[in-house]
Image: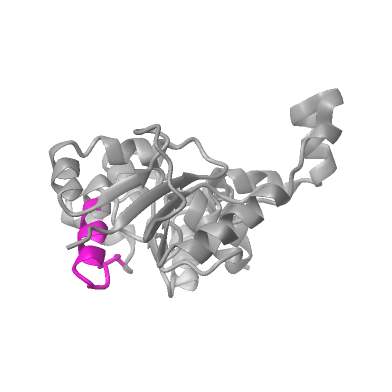
Protein backbone atom coordinates (compact mmCIF):
# COMPACT_ATOMS: atom_id res chain seq x y z
CA UNK A 1 0.00 0.00 0.00
CA UNK A 2 1.41 3.38 -1.04
CA UNK A 3 1.72 5.83 1.81
CA UNK A 4 0.32 9.37 1.32
CA UNK A 5 2.98 11.90 0.38
CA UNK A 6 3.02 14.89 2.73
CA UNK A 7 4.60 18.30 2.14
CA UNK A 8 5.05 21.31 4.41
CA UNK A 9 5.21 24.80 2.94
CA UNK A 10 6.03 28.22 4.38
CA UNK A 11 4.73 31.62 3.41
CA UNK A 12 5.08 34.75 5.56
CA UNK A 13 5.58 33.35 9.07
CA UNK A 14 8.16 32.49 11.70
CA UNK A 15 7.82 28.76 10.89
CA UNK A 16 7.20 28.15 14.59
CA UNK A 17 4.26 25.84 13.89
CA UNK A 18 6.47 23.57 11.80
CA UNK A 19 8.98 23.51 14.64
CA UNK A 20 6.17 22.32 16.92
CA UNK A 21 5.64 19.39 14.53
CA UNK A 22 9.27 18.40 15.05
CA UNK A 23 8.76 18.34 18.84
CA UNK A 24 6.20 15.55 18.80
CA UNK A 25 9.15 13.14 18.79
CA UNK A 26 7.98 9.51 19.20
CA UNK A 27 4.54 10.30 17.79
CA UNK A 28 6.22 11.74 14.71
CA UNK A 29 8.07 8.47 14.25
CA UNK A 30 4.75 6.64 14.49
CA UNK A 31 3.29 8.95 11.83
CA UNK A 32 6.24 8.24 9.56
CA UNK A 33 5.08 4.62 9.44
CA UNK A 34 1.90 5.91 7.81
CA UNK A 35 3.10 8.81 5.62
CA UNK A 36 6.03 9.84 3.48
CA UNK A 37 7.23 13.40 4.14
CA UNK A 38 8.56 14.55 0.78
CA UNK A 39 9.04 18.29 1.42
CA UNK A 40 9.76 19.87 4.79
CA UNK A 41 12.40 22.60 4.81
CA UNK A 42 12.78 22.55 8.59
CA UNK A 43 13.58 18.84 8.62
CA UNK A 44 14.88 17.54 5.28
CA UNK A 45 16.79 18.89 2.30
CA UNK A 46 14.85 16.85 -0.26
CA UNK A 47 11.96 18.43 -2.17
CA UNK A 48 9.23 16.99 -4.34
CA UNK A 49 6.70 18.44 -6.75
CA UNK A 50 4.38 15.50 -6.09
CA UNK A 51 2.41 15.30 -2.86
CA UNK A 52 -1.06 14.35 -1.66
CA UNK A 53 -1.39 16.38 1.55
CA UNK A 54 -0.03 19.91 1.99
CA UNK A 55 0.38 21.64 5.34
CA UNK A 56 0.71 25.37 4.68
CA UNK A 57 2.07 27.77 7.29
CA UNK A 58 2.05 31.55 6.89
CA UNK A 59 -0.14 34.30 5.51
CA UNK A 60 -0.09 35.79 2.02
CA UNK A 61 1.68 39.16 2.00
CA UNK A 62 3.15 39.41 -1.50
CA UNK A 63 1.77 39.09 -5.01
CA UNK A 64 4.48 36.57 -5.81
CA UNK A 65 3.09 34.22 -3.14
CA UNK A 66 -0.33 33.93 -4.75
CA UNK A 67 0.67 31.82 -7.75
CA UNK A 68 2.85 29.58 -5.59
CA UNK A 69 -0.07 28.92 -3.26
CA UNK A 70 -2.38 28.18 -6.19
CA UNK A 71 0.14 25.66 -7.50
CA UNK A 72 0.16 23.92 -4.13
CA UNK A 73 -3.65 23.82 -4.17
CA UNK A 74 -3.71 22.38 -7.69
CA UNK A 75 -1.22 19.67 -6.72
CA UNK A 76 -2.49 18.55 -3.32
CA UNK A 77 -5.66 16.58 -2.73
CA UNK A 78 -5.88 18.02 0.78
CA UNK A 79 -4.66 21.42 1.98
CA UNK A 80 -4.43 22.18 5.70
CA UNK A 81 -3.86 25.72 6.98
CA UNK A 82 -1.28 25.41 9.74
CA UNK A 83 -1.30 27.98 12.54
CA UNK A 84 -2.69 31.47 13.06
CA UNK A 85 -0.93 33.15 10.14
CA UNK A 86 -2.42 30.67 7.67
CA UNK A 87 -5.86 30.34 9.30
CA UNK A 88 -6.72 33.95 10.24
CA UNK A 89 -3.81 36.05 8.92
CA UNK A 90 -2.08 36.30 12.29
CA UNK A 91 0.32 38.99 13.43
CA UNK A 92 1.18 39.85 9.83
CA UNK A 93 -2.23 41.49 9.43
CA UNK A 94 -1.27 44.26 11.85
CA UNK A 95 0.35 46.01 8.88
CA UNK A 96 -3.09 46.25 7.25
CA UNK A 97 -3.84 49.21 9.52
CA UNK A 98 -1.46 51.28 7.38
CA UNK A 99 -1.03 52.28 3.78
CA UNK A 100 1.21 49.75 2.03
CA UNK A 101 3.66 52.33 0.70
CA UNK A 102 4.21 53.55 4.25
CA UNK A 103 4.80 50.00 5.43
CA UNK A 104 7.38 49.44 2.70
CA UNK A 105 9.18 52.66 3.60
CA UNK A 106 9.24 51.92 7.32
CA UNK A 107 10.58 48.38 6.85
CA UNK A 108 12.88 48.74 3.86
CA UNK A 109 13.81 52.44 3.85
CA UNK A 110 15.46 53.55 0.62
CA UNK A 111 15.18 50.03 -0.80
CA UNK A 112 11.38 50.02 -0.43
CA UNK A 113 10.62 50.00 -4.16
CA UNK A 114 12.57 46.76 -4.54
CA UNK A 115 10.17 44.80 -2.36
CA UNK A 116 6.64 43.63 -3.06
CA UNK A 117 4.01 43.87 -0.32
CA UNK A 118 0.21 43.65 -0.21
CA UNK A 119 -2.29 43.58 2.66
CA UNK A 120 -1.79 40.34 4.57
CA UNK A 121 -4.50 37.68 4.50
CA UNK A 122 -5.06 34.05 5.46
CA UNK A 123 -4.55 31.46 2.75
CA UNK A 124 -8.28 30.71 2.55
CA UNK A 125 -8.82 34.10 0.96
CA UNK A 126 -6.74 32.90 -1.99
CA UNK A 127 -7.48 29.15 -2.31
CA UNK A 128 -9.88 26.57 -0.92
CA UNK A 129 -8.68 25.13 2.39
CA UNK A 130 -9.89 21.71 3.49
CA UNK A 131 -8.95 21.82 7.17
CA UNK A 132 -7.51 24.21 9.74
CA UNK A 133 -5.12 23.66 12.64
CA UNK A 134 -5.38 26.81 14.71
CA UNK A 135 -3.10 28.58 17.18
CA UNK A 136 0.14 30.48 17.60
CA UNK A 137 1.79 28.11 17.76
CA UNK A 138 -0.34 25.06 17.02
CA UNK A 139 -1.05 22.46 19.69
CA UNK A 140 1.04 19.39 18.89
CA UNK A 141 -1.55 16.94 20.19
CA UNK A 142 -4.14 18.53 17.92
CA UNK A 143 -1.75 18.21 14.97
CA UNK A 144 -1.38 14.48 15.63
CA UNK A 145 -5.14 14.01 16.00
CA UNK A 146 -5.92 15.90 12.80
CA UNK A 147 -3.28 14.01 10.81
CA UNK A 148 -4.45 10.61 12.06
CA UNK A 149 -8.07 11.51 11.31
CA UNK A 150 -7.18 12.42 7.74
CA UNK A 151 -5.31 9.15 7.27
CA UNK A 152 -8.37 7.26 8.53
CA UNK A 153 -10.65 9.19 6.20
CA UNK A 154 -12.41 10.88 9.11
CA UNK A 155 -13.25 14.55 9.57
CA UNK A 156 -10.93 15.97 12.25
CA UNK A 157 -12.59 17.15 15.45
CA UNK A 158 -11.74 20.83 15.71
CA UNK A 159 -13.31 22.53 18.76
CA UNK A 160 -16.05 25.05 18.08
CA UNK A 161 -16.62 26.16 21.64
CA UNK A 162 -14.90 29.01 23.49
CA UNK A 163 -11.70 28.94 25.50
CA UNK A 164 -13.84 29.65 28.59
CA UNK A 165 -14.91 25.99 28.55
CA UNK A 166 -11.32 24.85 28.89
CA UNK A 167 -10.69 27.48 31.56
CA UNK A 168 -13.54 26.08 33.61
CA UNK A 169 -12.25 22.54 33.14
CA UNK A 170 -8.91 23.68 34.57
CA UNK A 171 -10.71 25.45 37.42
CA UNK A 172 -9.08 28.78 36.57
CA UNK A 173 -10.22 31.99 38.21
CA UNK A 174 -11.86 34.05 35.44
CA UNK A 175 -9.53 36.83 34.37
CA UNK A 176 -12.46 39.25 34.20
CA UNK A 177 -12.70 38.87 37.98
CA UNK A 178 -9.12 40.16 38.09
CA UNK A 179 -9.95 43.21 35.97
CA UNK A 180 -8.18 41.81 32.91
CA UNK A 181 -9.36 41.79 29.29
CA UNK A 182 -9.75 38.33 27.79
CA UNK A 183 -10.97 37.12 24.40
CA UNK A 184 -11.73 33.66 25.79
CA UNK A 185 -15.54 33.99 25.55
CA UNK A 186 -15.44 34.27 21.74
CA UNK A 187 -12.15 32.51 20.82
CA UNK A 188 -12.00 28.92 19.59
CA UNK A 189 -10.78 26.44 22.20
CA UNK A 190 -8.19 23.73 21.66
CA UNK A 191 -5.20 25.39 23.35
CA UNK A 192 -6.09 23.98 26.79
CA UNK A 193 -6.53 27.60 27.93
CA UNK A 194 -2.78 27.90 28.29
CA UNK A 195 -2.64 31.72 28.40
CA UNK A 196 -5.35 32.28 31.04
CA UNK A 197 -3.91 29.40 33.05
CA UNK A 198 -0.70 31.40 33.35
CA UNK A 199 -2.59 34.60 34.15
CA UNK A 200 -2.37 36.09 30.67
CA UNK A 201 -5.49 37.16 28.80
CA UNK A 202 -6.47 35.24 25.68
CA UNK A 203 -5.66 37.32 22.58
CA UNK A 204 -7.59 35.18 20.12
CA UNK A 205 -4.77 33.42 18.28
CA UNK A 206 -7.10 30.54 17.39
CA UNK A 207 -9.67 32.86 15.82
CA UNK A 208 -13.34 33.30 16.62
CA UNK A 209 -15.67 30.37 17.08
CA UNK A 210 -18.12 29.94 14.21
CA UNK A 211 -21.01 31.64 15.99
CA UNK A 212 -19.51 33.92 18.66
CA UNK A 213 -21.88 35.56 21.11
CA UNK A 214 -20.39 39.01 20.69
CA UNK A 215 -23.22 40.83 22.47
CA UNK A 216 -22.72 38.65 25.55
CA UNK A 217 -18.99 39.34 25.43
CA UNK A 218 -19.65 43.08 25.24
CA UNK A 219 -21.98 42.83 28.23
CA UNK A 220 -19.32 40.94 30.16
CA UNK A 221 -16.79 43.65 29.40
CA UNK A 222 -19.19 46.36 30.50
CA UNK A 223 -20.04 44.51 33.72
CA UNK A 224 -16.37 44.60 34.68
CA UNK A 225 -15.78 48.21 33.70
CA UNK A 226 -13.93 47.29 30.52
CA UNK A 227 -14.53 48.58 27.01
CA UNK A 228 -15.06 46.92 23.66
CA UNK A 229 -12.19 49.07 22.39
CA UNK A 230 -9.85 47.45 24.92
CA UNK A 231 -10.93 44.00 23.76
CA UNK A 232 -10.49 44.87 20.08
CA UNK A 233 -7.08 46.34 20.83
CA UNK A 234 -6.03 43.05 22.40
CA UNK A 235 -7.59 41.02 19.59
CA UNK A 236 -5.76 43.07 16.96
CA UNK A 237 -2.52 41.20 17.72
CA UNK A 238 -3.89 38.28 15.70
CA UNK A 239 -7.33 39.30 14.47
CA UNK A 240 -6.89 42.50 12.46
CA UNK A 241 -8.25 40.61 9.46
CA UNK A 242 -11.61 40.01 11.18
CA UNK A 243 -11.94 43.00 13.52
CA UNK A 244 -15.03 44.24 11.63
CA UNK A 245 -17.02 41.41 13.21
CA UNK A 246 -16.96 43.36 16.47
CA UNK A 247 -18.87 46.30 15.03
At 26% from the left and 65% from the top, the residue drawn is: 150
Let me know if residue 149 is in the magenta part.
Answer: yes
Which color mode does the image show?
one colour
Q: Residue at x 30, y 59 (%)?
A: 164
Q: Is residue 193 visible?
A: no
Question: Is residue 204 or residue 117 the one in the foreground?
Answer: 117
Q: Is residue 32 magenta?
A: no
Residue 2's x, y, as percent?
22, 60
Q: Residue at x 27, y 72 (%)?
A: 155
- State whether residue 161 is above or below residue 140: below
Return the residue nearer the eye: 28 or 243.
28
Image quadrant in which you'd find residue 43: top left
On screen, residue 101 versus residue 129, left or right, reads right
Residue at coordinates 56% horizontally, 59% vertically from top-left?
A: 71
Name of the residue lying farthest toward the front: 1
Which stretch did the figure color magenta?
A: 144-159
**Residue 7 location in percent, x, y?**
39, 50
Q: Say above or below: 215 vs 230.
A: below
The C terminus lies in quadrant: bottom right
Answer with the quarter of the image where residue 16 lies. Answer: top left
Where is residue 203 shown, x and y percent of the image? Answer: 45, 48
User: Which x, y percent locates residue 167?
Assistant: 25, 53
* Residue at the outermost top position: 110
Amino acid sequence: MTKPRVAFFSFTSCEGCQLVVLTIEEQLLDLLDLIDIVTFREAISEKSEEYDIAFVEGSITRESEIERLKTIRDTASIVIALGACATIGGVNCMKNQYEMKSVQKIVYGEMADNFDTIPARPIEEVVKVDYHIHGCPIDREEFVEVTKSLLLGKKPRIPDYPVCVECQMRENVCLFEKGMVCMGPVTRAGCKAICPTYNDGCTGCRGLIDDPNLSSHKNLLNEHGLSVEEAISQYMLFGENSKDKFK
